[in-house]
Image (tube, grey):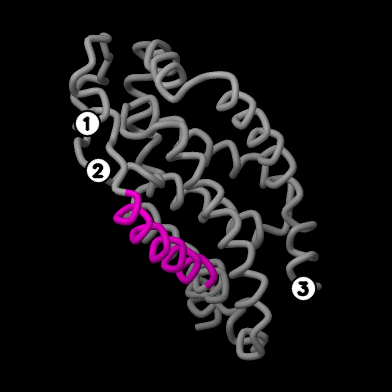
Amino acid sequence: MQKLTANTRQLYSFLIPYIILLLLVLIAKITYSKEEIYFFINGLHFPAGDVFFPFMTEFGSSVTAVVACLLLLFVSYRSSVLMATSLILTTAINVPLKNLFFAPRPRVYFAGSQHPIYYVPDVEVLANNFSFPSGHTVCAFTMAIVLTYITPKKSFGYLYLLLALLVAYSRMYMSQHFLEDVTAGSILATVVTIIWLSWFDSRPFLSDSRWNGSLSRKKNAA
């Protein structure tokens, strides 16, 4: 419990603005319906966004997650292991939840709607029932939490949160998810990752100094 409390304080730059945003989302959910929020966001498209957000959404992809783990091998083996295990755990929890809730994505949900919907050109809009929670958001927030945790300069947490939020918003901008989906994904990733890091990083075997080595240091030493 002490480790968990210490880690929560350590992640202040990420958690404080995130909690504020969650409260704003809760207010929006109380005030407006699921459909109203979706069509409001759907009406905010602009040419630069149609280019930027399809690019931004890839930061929450499995490819980016693998690349992040590999790149962290050049920082420290410990950092790479923390990232990899966190991503595996949050994904392992998220996938069964998608199957459990079997929630339709926007394209399926609004299949019979007469309301005009804007779809980003040249983007494949998924049409299945695996909308809740958002996997890209889970991945992005997991990486953001781990990066905030392992980065010595904790103010970088603001930047990592911004990047994760852009990934989450991109999923709504591209009509792949609803606000509920990305919100749930962010909460799942944040809570599970913080608990996991607090437990796993305190394991005795990770205190071995060899975990602080990296591929780059090994190369330099040679």
Residue situated in front as seen by the camera: 72 or 205: 205
Mark 3 to mark 2 CA distance (whole Å): 38 Å
Q: Provide the residue designation for mark 3.
A: 1
Q: Position of residue 161 (x, y in %)?
A: 60, 42
Is residue 38 rendered magenta in the image?
Answer: no
Q: Residues within 10 Å of mark 3 (few under 14, many from 20)?
A: few
Label for residue 129? Answer: 2
Is residue 97 part of the magenta span, yes or no? yes
Considering depth in this image, is 164 or 177 the residue closer to the camera? 177
Secondary structure at badge 3 equals loop
Residue at which label 1 appears: 108
Quick check: marks 1 and 2 in contact, CB under 8 Å? yes
Q: Nearer the viewer, residue 188 or 218?
A: 188
Location of the N terminus by quadrant is: bottom right
The residue carrying pointer 1 sits among few (fewer than 14), some (14 to 19) or many (20 or more) residues within 10 Å by Cα, namely some
Vertical relation: 140 (above or below) 72: above
> Where residue 112 sits in the image (x, y, percent)?
18, 19
> Would residue 181 appear left or right of 13 to someone viewing this image?
left
Give the mark toward the camera: 3 or 2.
2
Instruction: Please name which of the two marks, 3 or 1, marks the residue nearer to the observer.
Output: 1
Q: Which SS class for mark 2?
A: loop
Instruction: Give residue 199's quadrant in the image.
Output: bottom right
Residue 119 locus on image (x, y percent):
25, 19
- Residue located 66% across and 90% down the image: 204
| Residue appearing at x 39%, y 66% in the figure | 92
The residue lying at 28 percent from left, 46 percent from top is: 130
Residue 105 lies, in percent from the top left, at: 28, 35
Q: Is residue 17 above or below residue 196?
A: above
Residues in magenta?
82-101
